[in-house]
Amino acid sequence: MYIARQPIFEKDLSTFGYELLFRSSPNARGYDGTDANLSTITVLQGLLEAGVGKISDYSHVFVNFTREMLLSDLVEVIPPEQMVIEILEGTIVDDQLIQRVQHLKKTGYKIALDDFDADLGKYELIHDADIIKFDIRVTPLGTISSQVAEAHIRKKVLLAEKVETLEEFEQAKEMGFHLFQGYFFSRPNIITRATYKRQYKHTYLRILQELKSPEPSYQTLTEIIETDASLSYRLMKIISHRNQNQLSYSIKRALVQMGIKNFERWINILMLQDLSEDKPDELLKLSLVRSKFAEQLCEASHLQERKIDAAVMALFSTIDAILDDHMENVLTTVPLSPEIKAALLNGDSLLAPIYYTVICFEKGDLACVEKWTSELNIDTALLNGMYVKAVEWANKVYQ
């Protein structure tokens, strides 16, 4: 059983919260893949074990509840200020459920109607709902204008789900949707190279070129870094944090303490932070989660010695969206190893199984996850823990 999170955005692409997504392995014993109650219990258990704030970055978490789960006491194990209760489509509504929902709303929980496809005026729970979610793959935006208008009259928050392109995001925003969920934010908005607004700082390129030399020089790296006061300060903060706040007063000494491989990883993180300044925060967070997840997968496989390479590979998996260009074009400008580039272009690479595992886990493609973890000889029972650690690490780095 795997748990992942998917961001929910506001109109300005700031993060409103996350929906926690549950998937069960098709090979799991004793589970037929249809038990939504088990899904919710697993999500709640994961939240309690990991800490709600750690996995949600202290924003809202959206969790699906069946009728049976709504009527149980388990709903209230998560504080109301942190959780949005999603009521599944097809839930049987009667007086008992209405009273329970009204109680939860009075307690402070926000109520969302999931995958809504009904007559707003006649749906019994519409009065108590705060958020209405439309799956735009099932109910396309062009077919729900009357429902959207009715929801506005009733002052409901509208959430467009499965928004896959920037065009769909803009259309939903124009129609009056307030929240947006889907992978649209991680796709490049293709523009001509001549109009790039985001360029690599010369300092980063000089550092990366030196790191690719047969024997990188700490002295040369120090001299390059010291020409950039901001970069020097940020690197010293990272070293201080890694060494439990024991501050290094020398850039060169700090680099030696970190080591070339770890330094390369952190310089790439800092570079991507700069490049993604005008992008949604969630895009860099996604890169960071993928990076730490890939590193842990390597540690659990026969590729332990390649963990930093895997981390860098996964970190750059969103560079096309950051620079708004096709991946093959972007990679010609970045001094990464041929093996990392091959993996990112879905080619033949030792790191490819790690990359595919990360992406498939994120999308909930469990057959794909099990195919690649089997090749890597990784116990799938470890994946949830790895993912939660990756989320925690990304949140710390992003602060």
Image: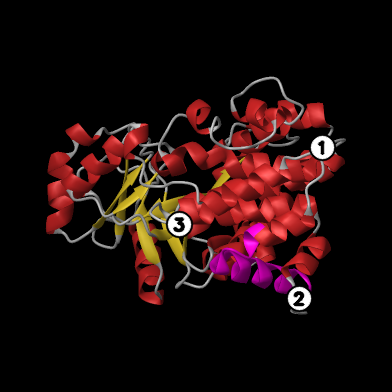
The answer to whether residue 219 shows anywhere in this view is yes
| Tag nearer the camera, 1 or 3 | 3
The secondary structure making up most of the magenta span is: helix
- Disc 3 marks a residue whose amino acid type is Asp
73 within the magenta span: no
Mark 1 or mark 3, which has the lower sequence index? 3
Q: In the visual, does 202 lie left or right of 387?
A: left
Which mark is first along the chain, 2 or 1? 2
Where residue 306 appears, as percent x and y from the top left, is 81, 40
Span highlighted in magenta in the image: 224-243
Residue 248: mark in rendering: 2
Q: Which residue is mark 3?
A: 281
* Residue kind at label 2, given as amino acid type: Ser
In the foreground, 83 or 197: 197
Q: Position of residue 287 (x, y in %)?
A: 57, 48
Q: Residue at x 27, y 36 (%)?
A: 167
Q: Quadrant of residue 336?
A: top right
- Give the CA separation, mark 1 to mark 3: 31 Å
Q: Which mark is residue 378?
A: 1
